[in-house]
């Protein structure tokens, strides 16, 4: 997927372009991306079969991380690299409010990579829409459970990810027991 495939022209929210979303994770034109891929010159990530692709302002800064390099899991923060409390900083909260702060701020996926070993942060620009706490908690759970199962390559399977996001958004589990049941269903699927 090239930058033009996701709206480098600056167009936003065209009808039918986004088919599913879970916080900053969304399916645009059949591609799963994290972040606002419609922002001109923005930063965003694409989940591909061969790994996580970091789109950047210049081609020299773009990077493909194969799924096999991710070691311990994927976490995310919103509004700051290391918020003091939880995974969302104050800037992450106000970036979802209407007005001049709407869409301001960045998010980060955090992971430890192997060969060579390094802690890596993949930045993405947030969308102008508000992310609900439930969406953010479900995304964190999806990232955590897939990481615990060491099944990172599943993020590169668009059909599987679509079913997983669909089940999470449909069920919206709010208890630990319900979340474990839904995540079990998601991970058992071949």
Image: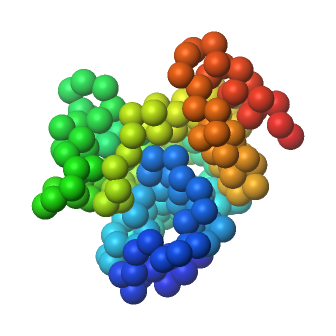
Say above or below: 147 vs 29: above
Viewport quadrant of the N terminus: bottom right
* Residue shown at the point (24%, 32%) measured from the top left: 83
Say above or below: 80 vs 17: above
* Residue shown at the point (44%, 72%) measured from the top left: 13
Residue 156 image point, x, y percent: 68, 54
Q: Name the one closer to the observer, 41 or 137.
A: 137
Q: Is residue 182 left or right of residue 99?
A: right
Residue 19 image point, x, y percent: 60, 62
The figure's colour scheme reads rainbow
Residue 147 image point, x, y percent: 61, 32
Q: Name the one closer to the observer, 64 or 182.
A: 182
Farthest residue, direction top: 177
Image quarter for residue 40? bottom left
* Residue shown at the point (31%, 26%) measured from the top left: 86
Question: How many discs mark residues in the rendered view?
Answer: 0
Q: Name the one closer to the observer, 77 or 62.
A: 77
Image quarter for residue 91? top left
Q: Name the one closer to the observer, 165 or 140.
A: 165
Can residue 137 be seen in the rendering of this structure? yes
């Amino acid at each position: 997927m090239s930058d033009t495939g996701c709206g480098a022209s600056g167009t936003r929210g065209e009808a039918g372009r986004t088919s599913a979303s879970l916080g900053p994770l969304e399916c645009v034109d059949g591609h799963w991306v994290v972040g606002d891929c419609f922002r001109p010159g923005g930063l965003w990530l694409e989940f591909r079969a061969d790994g996580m692709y970091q789109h950047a302002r210049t081609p020299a800064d773009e990077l493909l991380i194969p799924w096999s390099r991710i070691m311990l899991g994927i976490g995310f923060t919103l509004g700051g690299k290391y918020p003091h409390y939880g995974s969302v900083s104050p800037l992450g909260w106000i970036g979802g409010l209407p007005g001049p702060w709407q869409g301001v701020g960045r998010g980060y996926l955090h992971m430890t990579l192997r060969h060579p070993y390094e802690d890596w942060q993949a930045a993405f620009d947030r969308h102008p829409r508000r992310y609900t706490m439930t969406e953010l908690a479900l995304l964190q759970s999806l990232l955590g459970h897939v990481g615990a199962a060491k099944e990172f390559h599943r993020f590169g399977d668009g059909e599987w990810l679509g079913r997983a996001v669909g089940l999470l958004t449909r069920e919206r589990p709010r208890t630990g027991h319900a979340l474990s049941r839904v995540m079990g269903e998601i991970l058992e699927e071949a």
